[in-house]
Image (tube, rainbow, N blue to C red):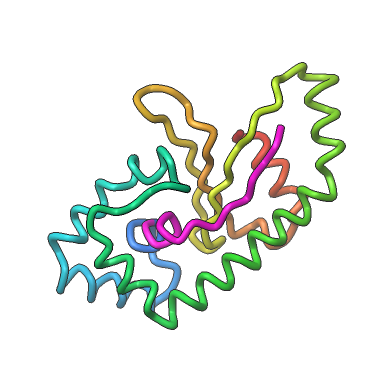
């Protein structure tokens, strides 16, 4: 099993806008965008499946809201925190990668697949495995508050979901 931990701005912004707010400033940003760009905001909600089908190559039809969020200092702070979180998960995975690979080869006899872990801010407290047209996609959206206490436990949870 090969895990690729990725921070994707579109996925992070989408989750910030459509999951529960992680702070009052995020809630205010969401409300402001909703009030001033209701049509684009609604259209963006429907983009999730398209985004998760191929996050690396996703290009939005209308990136107005994405650009507005990216331009805020609030988003820059959230992105930096998310990147730190991603690096901690990656560090833990690198420390245990050989054990994980050996376990899956010897005990589970499981084909080693590549799973893309789209890391979002841990305060979003969200785990989502998506299906596209009825088939499971090797992409997991991951951001869990409890992970910051024990990254090894987080890794076990990620493997369980993958």
Indicate whether residue 3 is drawn in magenta: yes
Residue extent of the magenta highlight: 1-14
Q: Position of residue 118 (x, y in %)?
A: 53, 49
In depth, the one of 142 and 47 nearer the eye is 47
Counting the numbered discs, the total is 0
Indicate whether residue 8 is drawn in magenta: yes
* Residue positioned most to the top: 109
User: With respect to residue 55, does 112 lie above or below?
Assistant: above
Q: Is residue 137 left or right of residue 105?
A: left
Residue at the image position 31 percent from the left and 75 percent from the top? 29
Q: Position of residue 10 (x, y in %)?
A: 40, 58
Residue at the image position 38 percent from the left and 48 percent from the top? 58
User: With respect to residue 146, does 162 lie above or below?
Assistant: above
Q: Is residue 68 left or right of residue 154?
A: left
The image quarter containing residue 53 is top left
Residue at the image position 20 percent from the left and 68 percent from the top? 34
Q: Position of residue 104 (x, y in %)?
A: 78, 25
Q: Quadrant of the N terminus?
A: top right
Q: Position of residue 111 (x, y in %)?
A: 70, 21
* Residue positioned most to the bottom: 73
Residue at the image position 83 percent from the left and 44 percent from the top? 96
Q: Quadrant of the C terminus?
A: top right
């Amino acid at each position: 099993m090969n895990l690729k931990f990725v921070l994707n701005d579109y996925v992070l912004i989408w989750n910030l806008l459509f999951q529960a707010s992680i702070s009052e400033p995020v809630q205010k940003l969401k409300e402001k965008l909703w009030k001033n760009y209701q049509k684009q905001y609604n259209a963006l909600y429907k983009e999730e499946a398209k985004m998760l089908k191929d996050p690396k190559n996703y290009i939005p039809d209308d990136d107005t809201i994405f650009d507005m969020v990216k331009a805020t200092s609030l988003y820059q702070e959230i992105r930096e925190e998310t990147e730190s979180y991603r690096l901690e998960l990656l560090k833990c995975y690198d420390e245990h990668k050989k054990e994980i690979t050996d376990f899956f080869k010897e005990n589970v006899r499981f084909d080693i697949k590549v799973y893309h872990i789209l890391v979002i801010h841990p305060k979003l407290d969200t785990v989502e495995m998506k299906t596209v047209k009825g088939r499971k996609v090797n992409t997991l959206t991951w951001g869990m508050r409890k992970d910051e206490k024990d990254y090894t436990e987080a890794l076990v949870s990620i493997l369980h979901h993958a």
